[in-house]
Image (spheres, rainbow, N blue to C red):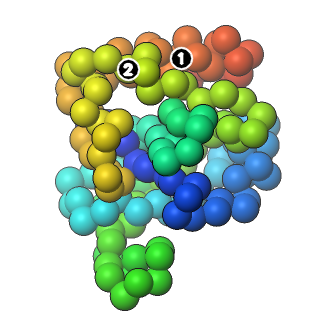
Amino acid sequence: MATYVLTWNPEKWDWAGLPSLAKRVLAGEPVRDTWDCGRRTAPRPGDRFYLLRQGVHPKGIVGSGEILSFPQPGEHWSGNGSTANYLDLQYHHLLDPAAFEPLDISRLHAPLHTLWRSRSSGATAPAEGEALLESLWRQHLEILLVEPPGP
């Protein structure tokens, strides 16, 4: 199982449905979504993902969950005529940054620091950094009084 970092930049896409989606996830509802993974083809069902908010403060990890599908090509979400690959996924946790502070990326040191500069969604987290990322995310959720992810 691999871990991927998917990205969201509010300067490029206004995620109007995020507050209600985050509430559903927080309530324990199994919520599925589709997300762009750039041109990457390596993600597989069962892999883990983290969702990184970029561009504007507060920046950081706002979600996590499981990838449910192989990447499928489609029209890029921007409508600029290009293509991207998309993953079906299920959130285990999703934070609305207007209500909960994201996991600050400044806490994520080597070997993870290069992930936070990625310009496209779907970067692979290095195997040696997966446990650190999971531990920091779990601690962050516990501080926010949100049930931490399962095993």
Q: Is residue 48 something one can see in this rendering?
A: yes
Q: Is residue 119 above or below residue 16?
A: above
If the image is split into quadrants, where does the N terminus sit? top left
Q: Neighbour class for label 2 at 10 Å: few (<14), some, many (≥20)?
A: some
Which of the pair 37/16 is nearer the observer?
16
Q: What amino acid is at disc 1?
A: Arg
Q: Which label sits on residue 36?
A: none
Q: What residue sits 47% from the left and 74% below the top?
A: 77
**Which quadrant of the figure has residue 124?**
top left
Q: Neighbour class for label 1 at 10 Å: few (<14), some, many (≥20)?
A: some
Q: Is residue 138 above or below residue 99?
A: above
- In this figure, which residue is indicated by the disc labeled 2? 108
Element assignment for label 1: helix
Q: Which label sits on residue 138?
A: 1
Element assignment for label 2: loop
Q: What residue sits 31% from the left and 17% below the top?
A: 109
Mark 2 or mark 1, which is nearer to you? 2
Count of numbered marks: 2
Q: Is residue 97 above or below residue 132?
A: below
Position of residue 149 in the picture relative to residue 110 (left or right): right
